[in-house]
Amino acid sequence: MPIISSSYSPSYLFRNGHISTIYPNLFRKVSGVIQQRERIELKDRDFIDLDWSYSTVQASKLCILIHGLEGNGQRQYITGLAKYLNQNNWDTVAINLRNCSGEPNRKYRSYYAGVSEDLDFIINYISSSYAYSSLSICGFSLGGNVLLKYLGEGREIPSQVCSGVAISTPCNLYDSLLQLNKPENVLYRIRFLRHLKKKLLEKQILFPDKIRISDIKKCKNLIDIDNLYTSVAHGYTNALDYYQKCSSKQFLPSIKIPSLIINAKNDTFLGADCYPYTEASQNKNVFLETPDFGGHVGYYLPNHVFYNEIRTFEFIEEHL
């Protein structure tokens, strides 16, 4: 499918990628979204919490939302999209990936950028338990990678699933890691590392025979976390093996459901290989939009609805 030209043209201030990235996280407040939590039990006796929000009408359409690294169902980019879709006759459900709902999970494993098996379980559960005629899925950052991997792995996908949208997605995980390691991204890197180490210390209390406090404290970079924990806990040889096998770019040629990727050109989290121009041009089901601006999950507009929220609604409505 030809690359989609983008109409996103923010004010001068929000043409800076860092401002676009940081501003909504610090200053955006989304009101009026009422979430109802449902806990579902997984096959391995762990759990995942789902946060539902509803349209004021009896909706037949549901959008499933997947957060990014160290996110949850209450992040402003999740509730902002939920509010806009609810106002436009879509119900939404935000997935809190394992260990992200405010309560430690039961297992040593957690969430990671390739956890499509959990997404598969959730979608099958929703499609068989609820009477929605149309399901769409929207993933942000790490969640976008999970979504695209899920869609392109060749599994049987419920017939109700009609579209997917991936926002600010690191389609090549190692390339994204290299970007995050650059000096201009030091503040993001420190923040992610601090949160991940805190969660690992919580895991260590529950599983003292599997991980040592001293090893957690030695982690200085994100790849150290992935070598020590992420790869080991989820069946990969090391961090590089994890990045290679879980990067969604390799799965794009096999996607059979209309899927939109929106990756801003000034997203400092994404390297050149995170923009799958070739894959989009060769698969009629993969639509790629690369605005000049937007940062990482930015896309600010002054009317309280962000550009990516408008585009998500337009795309999923178009592909019912």
Image (cartoon, helix red, strand yellow):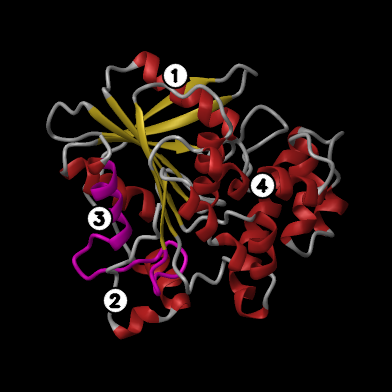
- Viewer-closest of 5 and 246: 5
Q: Residue 303, image x and y in percent?
A: 18, 66
Q: Residues within 10 Å of mark 2 (few under 14, many from 20)?
A: some
Q: Nearer the viewer, mark 1 or mark 4?
A: 1
Query: What label sits on residue 310 in the rendered view?
Result: 3
Q: Amino acid at mark 1?
A: Tyr
Q: Amino acid at mark 2?
A: Pro
The residue lying at 36 percent from left, 14 percent from top is: 129
- Viewer-closest of 256 and 236: 256
Alpha-carbon distance for marks 4 and 3? 34 Å
Alpha-carbon distance for marks 1 and 4? 28 Å
Q: Amino acid at mark 4?
A: Lys
Alpha-carbon distance for marks 2 and 1? 40 Å
Q: Which residues are magenta?
A: 290-316
Q: Residue 290, image x and y in percent?
A: 42, 65
First in residue order: circle 4 vs circle 3 = 4
The residue beneath circle 2 is: 10
Alpha-carbon distance for marks 4 and 2? 36 Å
The residue beneath circle 4 is: 199
Q: Secondary structure at mark 4?
A: helix
First in residue order: circle 1 vs circle 4 = 1
